[in-house]
Image (cartoon, rainbow, N blue to C red):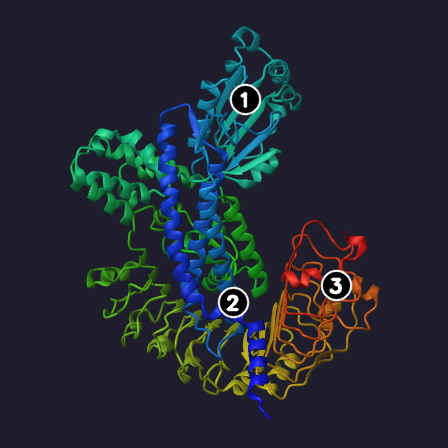
Amino acid sequence: MDLASPLLELVKGLWGLASKPLGYIYNLKDNVRTLDKANENLKASSEDVKAKVEREEEGGGAQRTNQVENWLGEVQEFEGRVDQVLQEVREHDRIKCLSRCLPRNCWSSYKLGKRVDQLLDEVRELQHKKGEINDFTSLLPPPRQVLNTPLDKTVGLDSGVGKTTLMRRINEKFLHANHGFEVVIWVVMSKHVNEDSIQDTIRKKLNIKDESWDGQSRNERVHLLGEVLSKKKSVLLMDDVWAGLELSQIGVLHSSLENESKIVFTTRLKQVCHHMGADETFEVQCLTPEEGLALFENNIGKSSIHSHPEIQELANNIVRECKGLPLALITVGRAMAGRENPDEWKHALTTLRNNPYKLSGMVEEVYHILEFSYNSLNDSIVKLCFIYCCLFPEDYRIRTDSLIELWIGEGLLRDTDDVYSMRYKGEYVLRTLEMACLLESGHDDYEGRHVKMHDVIRDMATWIARDRGKKENKLLVIVNQEDMSTEMISKWWEAKKVSLWGQWIQNIDQTPPMCSQLETLFVRETNVTLVPKGFFNSMAACLTVLDLSNNEKIQSFPEGICNMINLRYLNLSATSINAMPKKIRKLTHLGWLLLDHLLGGIVIPRGAITSLPLNVFSSWGSSLENEEEVVEELGRMQGLTDLSIKVNKSFSALKIFQSFQRCIRRVGIENCEGLTHIPIRSGNFSHLEVLNFVNCHMLVKMEINQGIGQAPNCYCFPSLVEVLIINCGFLDLSWLVHAPKLQSLMVWHCNSMEKIIGNGIAREELAASGLFSRLKFLLIENLPKLRSICDHALLFPQGVKFEINRCPGLRKLPLDSNGMRGSFSIQAAKGWWEEFEWDPAAR
C-alpha cells in the first residue's frame, strides 16, 4: 500500500493551518528588512510632498488640503509605529526564542511578526493613497485646533513644554485675524494666584475706567466685570495656571460664555484642566524639527547661520539637541546671536550635550522655569524618584515595573515593610510625575508599560541631582567607550550614583579609585564580557544597589560582589551567568535577588540563599538546574514575600501551590510530564498576578475546594491578571471564576478543551464571580474541540479584544445585549465570520 501520498497530503494540510502564524515567527527578520526599506521609501515620498506643500504655503494664501494633511499625518504616525516596532525587535533579539525559553517570548515573537506583517500591508496602502491625491493645497482656511473648537467652550492646554509659545501663537491669530471677537485678553498667571491683579488686567482690556473701578468692593468688581463680559464676545487667554482657579470669583461667570466667548488656558499640571472644568483638553506637543529651526533662526538671525558653510549643520545639530522645546531654542538662539566662528558653535554644541547648564542663560531662562514643576511636588519622596530617572540615558524607554523595583531597592518607598504596598505607592508616584508633565507616558508593548523623560527636563533633573551644578561628578551616566578612560574613572571617588549603559561599552579595563560614597551602580546592556578582578573592591563597603542586567556576554559571577556587606538589591537578569557562588550568603542585607530571563540554566548551591534576608526572589523565564533544591530552600525563607519562578518538575509545581500562597506573584509551570492535576484545598493566592501552564500534556484540571463569593477572601486568585496556557490537557478552565481581575487570557493548542468555562457553574455564581468583567484581551488558537467559551452570557468591559484562530467548532460568543458595554473588537478569519451565529438580542 502506498502511504506516501496520503501522508504528504496530511502534512500539506497541517502546514496550511500552521504556516501563517509560524511565518510570523520564522519570517520575522526578512519582513523587518522589507519593512525598513519600504518605510525609507515612504519617508522619502512624504518629504517630497511636504517640501512641495511648504513652498506653496510660504507663498501665502494657501494651505495643504485635508487629504494631504491626513496622508502626511498617517505617514508620520505610521513611521512612529514602525520605529517603535523596530526598537522592540532590537530589544526582543536580546531574549533568544530557543526551545527552552519562556513561551511568553515565543508569543512576543508571534505578536511582533504579526505586527510587522500588518505594517507591510499598511505601507503598501499608504503608497497607494498618495497616488490618489489630486490637489496638494487649497485656499487658506481658518486656524485649526484651539481656534476651531466650538464657541462657548473652555479649552485647557497641558504639558511641561511649549505652552507659552503656543499661547502666543493663539494670541497672534486672534489679534490679527477676523474671528468676530471684540476683545482678546491675555493674562500671565503666577504660581501664587493674585486675583486682584488678574481682575485689573481684565478690566483694563475691557476699557473700564479707573473712576468706575477704584473704591469698589470685591463683590462690586466681580459684578461689574461679569456685566461687561456678558455684552462682549471675548477671548480670555490665561498662561501657566498653577491651581484650579474659580473664575466666578474674579468676575468671569459661566453666563458670560453664552455670547460665544471663549476661555483658553495653559497649565503644566493635568489635574488643573479638570479643576477648571475644561470642555476640551489638548496636550501640547514639542515643535517639529522644521518649526524648531525656524524659531531658532528668529532668535539668532539668519545672517549668523549663513556666515559660514559649517554653521548651518552645527545649527541643525543644536536644534536637534533642544528636542523641540521652545524655551531652550529661544535661550540657545539668543546665546549664539552674533557668533560667526564655527569653533564657537562647536563648543556650544559640546556644552549642550555634556554640560548644558554651562551655556549662557540655560539655568536662568530654562531650568528655573522648568524647576517650578519640580518644586510643585510637595512630597520629597516623589522628588527623589523623579531625580532617580536621570540614571537612564537620553530618550530611553524606561519600563515602569523595573523603575518601581529600583525605587524600592533604593529604599525610596520604604515607609512600609510590605513590598506590595510599596509597588502600589510606586504606581502613585509615577502617575504624580506624569500628571506634573515631568514624565511622558508611553504605550504598552510586550514588555509592559514605559515612561520617558524629555531630554531638556532630564538635563534639568541632572543639574538638580548634581547640587544645581556644584558637584558635577555626584551623578555620572556613561554611554560611550571613550568615557571609560582613566580620567573619567578617576572621578568616581566623588560619585554617589554611576550608570554605565549601552552596547558601545565593550571593555571595563580600569579599576576605580576608592569610592567611599558610591551607593548605586548600573552596568546595563553593554557588550562587556568580563568584570575585572578587584573592580568592586573600592565600593564594597558602601554599595547598596547593583544592576548588571542585560549584559548577555557576562558568563561568570563577578568576583567582589560577595564582599558588598551593605548590598540590598542585586539584578543579574538577562546575563549568561550559569552559577551562583556559595559566598553569596555573606550578603546579609540582600533583600532583592533578580535572575530573570537568563540565557542559560543556573545553579544555586545548596545553602547559598537560605540565610539571606530576601524579600524578593525572581527567576522568571530562567531555568534552575537544581530546581527542587532551590524550591525547598525558598520554602524555608520566612521573610520572602514576592516570588516569581518558572519550574518544570511536578514536585516543584505542587510544592508552590501547597506552600507558597502568601508570596507567589508569578509562576510558570512548564514541561511537567507527570502532572495530572493541581489540588488547592484552602487559602487564597492573594498576590498571584501571572500564571502560565506550558507543555503540561497530562494536566487536565485544577481542583479548588472553595466556594465563590463577593468578598475578596472568597476567591482563590483575587489578584490574577494574566493567564497563558499552551499545549496542555485541560478540559476546561472553570477555575477562572476565582480570578475576578483577569485582564489577559491566551489559550493555544489544547486539543482536549471543549469549553473555557465548563458545566456545573450556575448563572448566579458566574454573576457573583465577576468573571471576565475586567478582561482586555482574549486569544484562543488551535482548539479543535472547543464548542463554547461559556454557556451563559457574560458582562464584558468596554474595549475588550477577542482574537480567534483555528477554532472550527466555536460558533457563538457569550454576548448578548446586556453583556456588551460600548465598543469591542473581534479578530478572526473570514471563514469563521461566515458561520458565526449572533445572539438576536445582541444585534
Residue 381 in percent (x, y) is at 49, 53
Q: Residue at x 77, y 53 (%)?
A: 842
Q: Residue at x 60, y 33 (%)?
A: 276
Residue 94 in percent (x, y) is at 41, 69
Q: Amino acid at mark 1?
A: Val
Please name the residue that numbered disc 1 is placed on. 235
Q: Amino acid at mark 2?
A: Tyr
From the image, state whether disc 1 or disc 2 is nearer to you.
2
Query: How many numbered callouts?
Result: 3
From the image, state whether disc 1 or disc 3 is nearer to you.
3
Q: Amino acid at mark 3?
A: Lys
Please name the residue that numbered disc 3 is placed on. 812
Spatial separation of the CA atoms under disc 1 and disc 3? 55 Å
Residue 19 in percent (x, y) is at 53, 71
Q: Quadrant of residue 550?
A: bottom left
User: Above or below — where is 141 with respect to 454?
Assistant: above
Secondary structure, mark 1, is: strand
Q: Quadrant of residue 603?
A: bottom left
Residue 564 in percent (x, y) is at 37, 73
Most extreme residue toward the front, as rendered? Answer: 1
Please name the residue that numbered disc 2 is placed on. 110
